[in-house]
């Protein structure tokens, strides 16, 4: 795929739409994304790992603007209020007006924090997502969820703030470490597990090619996942119903990430384990068959993702963290479970005893 013919997917909302461009060399071709900048100020938010690789390329497209950069340290632990404050200070020093734009150059942490910063400055300015990880390309860069973490839990503070555009240059995946790449595959698998059994079967057939980063296969997988998410977001932008299905595995996964202080597991790894726990809970509740759980487990293993809860995690602690999930209503657990591959659903009032039983089994505790 050349920079002249990227895959283009439109996220269509009630008031406007925005493009998601997927291709190689897009960061080196600003003619496409520069037109989405409306004012004369831009702040590029990135991190200490990504900026040395790609910031100069983006800077070439900002010629003639007043712009600056703000860099985070790399990692989920830096998605904090304190860093939002520093990013807002950077906008202030820039003299950013209401037509300014924040550019998120990095993975999900950078995208979430940059989007939240843009939502806060002058009650909302433009931002552009330039995801550089597979996970952020297929998930967090699309849909407008922004936010930061608290010690009590992940993404407990945030806002819905849609980007002006998403520029997914798959060339940036060439430098992505293998573990980060596999973590992104978890979100691809999740989309299939939620609502597309046919896509799940395709992933099973192409798992080896995906593991080897075959470009044609990778672009097809990214585009399929983005189209699916774009459709869900168009129907339920602020997660009043269907969009909650995209959180399959997240309630378990976020608890695992928080319990590990955001250093034990990557987000995609937490989602992988969380999906499998959700499948096992669905089995326990009589909603799904063991055959579906085994297919999910096998695909996760084939793509190199973890399927076991790390040692030292306590079921009661994980359950306590799950109680803080944003989907819970009136003090009862609301989880995304499934009735088999491609048939996820929202289940409210889940019995905590069943959740604990699954967690005890997964952690090998009694």
Image (spheres, grey):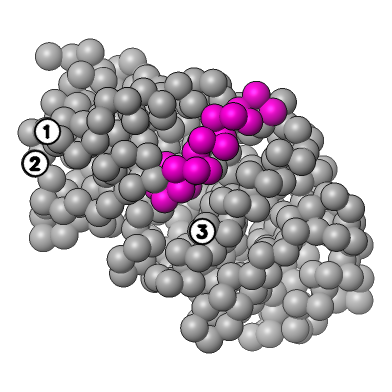
Which secondary structure, mark 3? helix
Q: Is residue 66 above or below residue 69?
A: below
Residue 11 visible in rendering: yes
Q: Which mark is residue 166?
A: none
**Number of numbered discs visible in the structure rendering:** 3
Give, as a single range, the part of the protein colored magenta.
191-209
Residue drawn 47% across the image and 67% down it: 233
| Cα–Cα gap, marks 2 and 1 | 6 Å
Residue 93 visible in rendering: no
Q: Position of residue 254 (x, y in %)?
A: 36, 41
Q: Position of residue 86 (x, y in %)?
A: 58, 60
Classify 10 Å Cα crowding around label 1: few (below 14), some (14-19), many (20 and above): some
Q: For this rendering, which residue is in front, 159 or 82?
A: 159
Q: Which mark is residue 229?
A: 3
Q: Earlier in the sequence, mark 1 or mark 3?
A: 3
Q: For this rendering, which residue is in front, 343 or 50?
A: 343
Q: For this rendering, which residue is in front, 9 or 272?
A: 9
| Tag 1 residue | 354
| Tag 2 residue | 351
Q: Is residue 360 above or below residue 214?
A: above
- Classified by dominant secondary structure, the portion drawn in magenta counts as helix
Residue drawn 57% across the image and 37% down it: 202
Q: Earlier in the sequence, mark 2 or mark 3?
A: 3
Which secondary structure, mark 1? helix
Which secondary structure, mark 2? loop
Q: Position of residue 27 (x, y in %)?
A: 83, 56
Q: Nearer the viewer, mark 1 or mark 3?
A: 3
> Does residue 223 appear left or right of residue 363 in this picture?
right
Classify 10 Å Cα crowding around label 3: few (below 14), some (14-19), many (20 and above): many
- The reply to whether discs 2 and 1 touch (Cβ–Cβ < 8 Å) is yes
Q: For this rendering, which residue is in front, 212 or 199?
A: 199
- The reply to whether discs 2 and 3 touch (Cβ–Cβ < 8 Å) is no
């Amino acid at each position: 795929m050349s920079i002249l013919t990227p895959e283009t997917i439109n996220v269509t909302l009630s008031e406007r739409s925005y493009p998601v461009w997927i291709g190689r060399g897009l960061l080196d071709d600003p003619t496409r994304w520069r037109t989405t900048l409306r004012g004369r100020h831009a702040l590029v938010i990135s991190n200490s790992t990504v900026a040395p690789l790609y910031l100069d390329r983006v800077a070439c497209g900002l010629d003639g603007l007043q712009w600056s950069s703000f860099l985070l340290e790399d990692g989920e632990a830096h998605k904090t209020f304190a860093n939002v404050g520093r990013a807002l200070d950077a906008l202030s020093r820039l003299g950013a007006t209401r037509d300014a734009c924040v550019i998120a150059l990095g993975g999900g942490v950078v995208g979430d924090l940059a989007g939240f910063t843009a939502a806060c400055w002058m009650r909302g300015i433009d931002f552009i997502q330039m995801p550089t990880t597979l996970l952020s390309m297929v998930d967090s860069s699309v849909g407008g969820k922004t936010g930061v973490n608290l010690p009590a839990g992940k993404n407990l503070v945030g806002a819905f703030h849609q980007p002006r555009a998403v520029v997914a240059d798959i060339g940036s995946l060439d430098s992505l470490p293998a573990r980060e790449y596999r973590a992104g595959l978890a979100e691809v698998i999740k989309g299939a597990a939620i609502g597309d059994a046919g896509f799940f079967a395709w992933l099973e057939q192409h798992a080896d090619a995906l593991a080897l980063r075959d470009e044609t296969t990778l672009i097809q997988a990214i585009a399929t996942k983005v189209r699916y998410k774009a459709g869900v977001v168009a129907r339920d932008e602020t997660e009043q119903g269907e969009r909650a299905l995209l959180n399959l595995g997240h309630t378990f996964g976020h608890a695992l990430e928080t319990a590990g202080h955001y250093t034990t597991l990557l987000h995609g790894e937490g989602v992988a384990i969380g999906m499998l726990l959700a499948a096992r809970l669905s089995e326990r509740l009589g909603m799904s068959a063991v055959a579906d759980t085994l297919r999910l487990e096998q695909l996760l293993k084939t793509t190199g993702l973890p399927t076991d809860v790390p040692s030292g995690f306590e079921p009661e602690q994980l359950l306590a963290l799950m109680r803080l999930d944003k989907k819970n209503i009136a003090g009862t657990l609301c989880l995304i479970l499934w009735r088999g591959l491609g048939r996820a659903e929202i289940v409210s009032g889940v019995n905590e005893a069943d959740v604990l039983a699954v967690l005890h089994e997964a952690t090998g505790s009694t």
